[in-house]
Amino acid sequence: MQVVWFKKDLRVADHRPLFEAAKSGASLCVYIYEPELLQSPEFDSSHLGFINESLQELRHSLHALGGSLILRVGEATSVFSTLHTEFGIDTVWSHEETGNAITYARDLRVNDWLRQQGIPWREFPQTGVIRRLKNRDGWSRSRNQFMAQEIVPVPTSICFAEGIEAGSIQEARDLGLEKSPKKNLNKGGERIARELLNSFLSERGQNYSRKMSSPVSAHDACSRLSSSITWGCISIRQVVHALRERQREIREVKQEGQATGGWLSSLKSFDARLSWHCHFMQKLEDQPSIEFENMSRVYDGLRESEYSQERFEAWCEGKTGYPMIDACMRALREHSWINFRMRAMLVSFASYHLWLHWRNPAVYLAKHFLDFEPGIHFSQVQMQSGTTGINTVRIYSPIKQVIDQDPHGEFIRRYVPELSGVPNEHLPEPHKMTRDEQLMAGCWIGRDYPEPIVEHLTAYRAARDKIHAIRRQAGAKEEAKKIVKKHGSRKGTSRRTRSKQRNRNAGHDENQRTLF
């Protein structure tokens, strides 16, 4: 019996394990609800809802091919052991996964068990991540070659192993999880993923490069594919192929002398972000410790001794006294999505203004991101908190972000209704209203809305000075060179330029081109 192990690849299209297993004999398609993952602090029942929607559609798609989806609850090796005892496993087929420490340890256990049983495990890549990569030279070319490969076709039919109980979809209560109160979340499944991709490439994405930064416009202007890609309802290769076709169409229109609006620049920006998806995941693949440890160890001890639980909880609850921070956090807690610039701002504020070590905020955000992808997440959180040692220090001003991204207060008033009566000119810093102005606005600072948890300029200057003091140290510069060599982007650079990159100091921003 061929076992196809579905993990974060909940689709039938461009699914090489499924395609190869179907050619090899009677196949058993399995998804495992793993308690260790479900109970982790990074998991939320909103994730489960998306997974279940995807599983429902996957089960239907497999049934149409003559197969079935078997659902089990338990530790992976235990599930496989039971299946092997009852039916006999010939080969296990799956995609490679660059996950968190839990999935990595689980894969090691599965690998050991399968080897002991003499059962082959055939794994295939589904992103541009390369296992056991020796160095970054040529990585971008390899990634692009993978994306250029043909889409793996859906099997014409599956010979299903008979006599196996299918198992049922597990709801939150079945797994000991609280039901999610969140609403208006992205939906799971291949159909929704295809619809999002098509609507983005045909309509919504025209002004992507111009509108993706503001939370007012990003909801519609962004692709909103991140959750679908994370859980594998669509492969990133499928997205790349569709993008290439759309780029060809737009170029042909331009050659005919017709106006293309903002399409070419927007599609170029989107293309870059698809590359960066794999670029950041490769970092965790190459250095799994960055899930828990600073990428640059010279920053160890920088924030740990000054950790404040009170500040952390105010940040989590959206009660910092800074309207854009609070609106974004409340929106995230309600919908499990916020656009990238606002994500970066949230991490920056937690790291610099509140001087919190990145680990607790990272775990909290992972729980509330429906598109939580460990490789991207932990690399990005470290980059935004200044502990990579190689990226430009960017300390977002929560005041300036109001002026730049929500000047009319549309987003802020929606998610921080206590500020609904505050005039636009006071929204960046409502605490600076006079008592009479607060009375007129119906918002008493300190009662209806909190005072700022920290003073912006004081916190900004203190954080900047502490970070730069470390970056100027000789040890920090030497370590930065090693990090650039291991993780730095090589895209668009010659051998001579790459040689120079390796010798740059800690001020080098290896991802100047690779910020989301």
Image: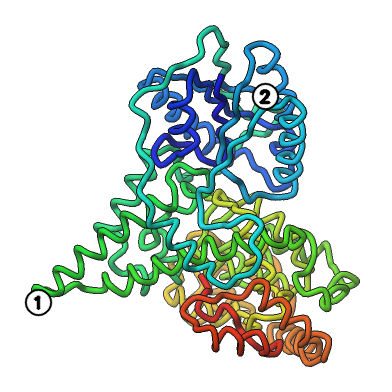
Above or below for 169 versus 335: above
Image location of residue 135, percent across then percent down: 64, 69
Q: Secondary structure at mark 1?
A: loop
- Is residue 352 among what the camera can see? no
Looking at the picture, the colour scheme in use is rainbow
- Is residue 269 among what the camera can see? yes
Q: Secondary structure at mark 2?
A: strand
Residue type (three-letter) at the residue carrying disc 1:
Gly
Instruction: Using a 10 Å C-alpha cutoff, classify the residue at mark 1 as few (fewer than 14 neighbours), some (14 to 19) or many (20 or more).
Output: few
Along the horizontal axis of the image, is 492 left or right of 308? Answer: left
Above or below for 502 versus 178: below
Image location of residue 90, percent across then percent down: 60, 22
Residue highlighted by disc 1: 257
Residue highlighted by disc 2: 73
Above or below for 137 versus 360: below
**Image label count:** 2
Q: Residue at x 58, y 22 (%)?
A: 71
The quadrant of the image that shows the N terminus is top right
Image location of residue 265, percent across then percent down: 31, 75
Residue type (three-letter) at the residue carrying disc 2:
Val
* Viewer-nearest residue: 44 or 480: 480
Q: Which mark is residue 468?
A: none
Above or below for 219 versus 211: above
Q: Residue at x 77, y 74 (%)?
A: 296
Along the horizontal axis of the image, is 88 left or right of 226? Answer: right
Image location of residue 483, percent across then percent down: 71, 76
Q: Residue at x 67, y 34 (%)?
A: 178
* Viewer-nearest residue: 36 or 277: 277
Q: CA distance from mark 1 to mark 2?
A: 58 Å
